[in-house]
């Protein structure tokens, strides 16, 4: 098989039936699990395109909601479509009173991603008509479900922050754009409404846009896998949120800031840490460096590194962690250990510093990543749901456990 951009693949769908062999590819690093028309990624050359558009152009000219529409529907929206989409998002931003009670059932110090995935999953219970677990019916109400997912994941994110901080909820405002509305729900105080300065809303837009989709990563593959069983959009995305919570995936942005803070608290300028990172010990890894597919550079890291610098300058923020990050970046890029292993900064290396500058607490970083990634999850679920004769994802394994043995009772039963 040959893809649009010339990437070649071997179709082994009949391998086991015809030969009795299966292919072994632990972690699926060399396996294409699907055909997809959403995102093109060339990790060797640092290329990322959404629906054909280079990420650099989207970052420069688009915003999160327009890119979300592009990712989901395949084309940039014209004025009328953009207006309708925006309206649907605004109309579906709020969390109903009964659903708000779920928040109070969680401990105040619950991991935010555990709260987000559970509360998001409950959308299938509150809106069962949009989540029937029947592809044809769920596709018929897809526009509404997609808008709800994008709009409500953001509202849930802001509400769980308010709940965990012991602050009263701030409800979404119909007249605010998407990012401004999130910041309003996060940071408004009684009688003092938070109004985002343009630099701040631009930075948040960029951050979310850069995360909008990223091909068959761990969480997106999870969404597709769960969706392939005909599970509805909300349930499938909730599984994706769980997958994103791991530190080797979405949790890396908070790990980066924690690492930079520890370096700072140790009075290290980064050089001691770099030495430790070269030991090969997984617990000393330079977080925010390396990527499963980018073996050149992560184009998102270039964009976000510059945006980070610009934002901090514009806001007049002097963050010592940014200085340490830059030093680590420069040192690692000259060091043979990192060069020979093709380890370059990934998007998470600077995204945490941007979020700090926006006032977003470290505990919420992965939640913000999830808000950004929701359009990609939606688009991938839609591809699975609308693929005629698509089959359930069901890989094989190579069994390495004990051979058949006979049962012998080991202890008296109580
Ligand atoms: N710091 C130091 N050494 C590293 C790092 C790192 N961040 N990443 C990889 N290495 C080393 C490994 O020790 C290994 O060395 P060896 O060949 O001497 O054994 C070599 O580089 C290859 O490592 P792998 O783990 O095989 O590389 P892989 O491509 O599978 O891993 C991963 C990619 C998981 C992202 C890894 O680079 C890592 O753990 N990075 C830090 C966590 C991180 O930033 N994750 C975010 C990913 S981006 C995202 O999800 C949005």
Image (cartoon, rainbow, N blue to C red):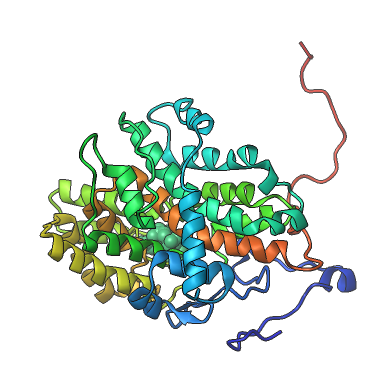
In the image: residue 73, left or right of residue 90: right
Is residue 335 in view?
A: yes
Tell which residue pokes out farthest to the top in this image: 414
Task: Kindly identify the residue that appears in the image at 25 percent across and 61 percent down.
Answer: 274
Tell me the quadrant of the picture where the C terminus can be found.
Answer: top right
Tell me the quadrant of the picture where the N terminus can be found.
Answer: bottom right
Task: Kindly identify the residue that appears in the image at 20 percent across and 40 percent down.
Answer: 192
In the depicted structure, whether residue 189 falls above or below residue 32: above
Q: Position of residue 11 (x, y in %)?
A: 75, 78
In the image: residue 108, left or right of residue 319: right
Q: Position of residue 333 (x, y in %)?
A: 27, 74
**Front position in the image: 77 or 241:** 77
Count of numbered badges drawn on the protein: 0
Please tell me in which quadrant of the rendered image residue 142 appears: bottom right
In the depicted structure, whether residue 226 falls above or below residue 405: below
Q: Position of residue 317 (x, y in %)?
A: 12, 57
In the image: residue 130, left or right of residue 73: right
Task: Kindly identify the residue that appears in the image at 46 percent across and 69 percent down.
Answer: 67
Please tell me in which quadrant of the rendered image residue 198 appears: bottom left
In the depicted structure, whether residue 55 falls above or below residue 65: below
Is residue 362 in view?
A: no
Tell which residue pokes out farthest to the bottom in this image: 6
Figure quarter occupied by ligand 1: bottom left
**Front position in the image: 142 or 162:** 142
Q: Position of residue 69 (x, y in %)?
A: 51, 67
Task: Kindly identify the residue that appears in the image at 76 percent across and 18 percent down.
Answer: 411
């Amino acid at each position: 098989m040959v893809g649009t951009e010339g990437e070649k693949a071997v179709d082994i769908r009949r391998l086991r039936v015809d030969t009795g062999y299966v292919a072994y590819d632990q972690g699926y690093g060399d396996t294409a699990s699907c055909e997809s028309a959403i995102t093109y990624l060339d990790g060797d050359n640092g290329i990322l395109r959404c629906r054909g558009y280079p990420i650099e152009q989207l970052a420069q000219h688009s915003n999160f909601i327009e890119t979300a529409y592009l990712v989901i529907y395949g084309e940039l929206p014209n004025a009328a479509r953009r207006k309708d989409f925006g309206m649907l998002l605004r109309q579906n931003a709020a969390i109903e009173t009964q659903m708000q009670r779920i928040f109070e059932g969680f401990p105040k110090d619950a991991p935010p991603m555990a709260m987000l995935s559970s509360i998001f999953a409950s959308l299938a219970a509150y809106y069962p008509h949009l989540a029937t677990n029947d592809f044809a019916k769920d596709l018929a109400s897809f526009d509404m479900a997609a808008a709800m997912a994008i709009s409500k994941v953001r509202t849930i994110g802001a509400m769980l922050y308010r709940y965990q901080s012991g602050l009263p909820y701030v409800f979404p405002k119909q007249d605010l754009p998407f990012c401004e509305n999130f910041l309003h729900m996060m940071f408004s105080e009684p009688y003092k409404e938070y109004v985002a300065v343009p630099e701040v809303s631009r930075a948040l837009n960029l951050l979310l846009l850069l995360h909008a989709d990223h091909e068959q990563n761990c969480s997106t593959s999870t969404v597709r896998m769960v969706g392939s069983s005909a599970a509805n959009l909300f349930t499938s995305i909730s599984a994706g949120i769980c997958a994103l919570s791991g530190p080797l995936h979405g949790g890396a942005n908070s790990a980066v800031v924690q690492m930079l803070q520890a370096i700072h608290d140790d009075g290290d300028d980064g050089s001691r840490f770099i030495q430790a990172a070269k030991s090969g010990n997984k617990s000393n890894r330079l977080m925010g460096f390396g990527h499963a597919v980018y073996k050149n550079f992560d184009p998102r890291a270039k964009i976000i590194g510059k945006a980070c610098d610009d934002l901090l300058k514009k806001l007049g923020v002097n963050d010592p962690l940014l200085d340490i990050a830059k030093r680590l970046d420069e040192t690692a890029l000259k060091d043979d250990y990192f060069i020979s292993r093709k380890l370059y900064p990934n998007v998470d290396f600077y995204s945490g510093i941007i979020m700090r500058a926006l006032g977003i607490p470290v505990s919420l970083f992965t939640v913000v990543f999830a808000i950004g990634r929701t359009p990609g999850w939606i688009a991938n679920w839609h591809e699975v749901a609308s693929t005629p004769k698509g089959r359930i994802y069901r890989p094989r394994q190579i069994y390495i456990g004990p051979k058949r043995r006979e049962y012998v009772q080991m202890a008296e039963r109580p």
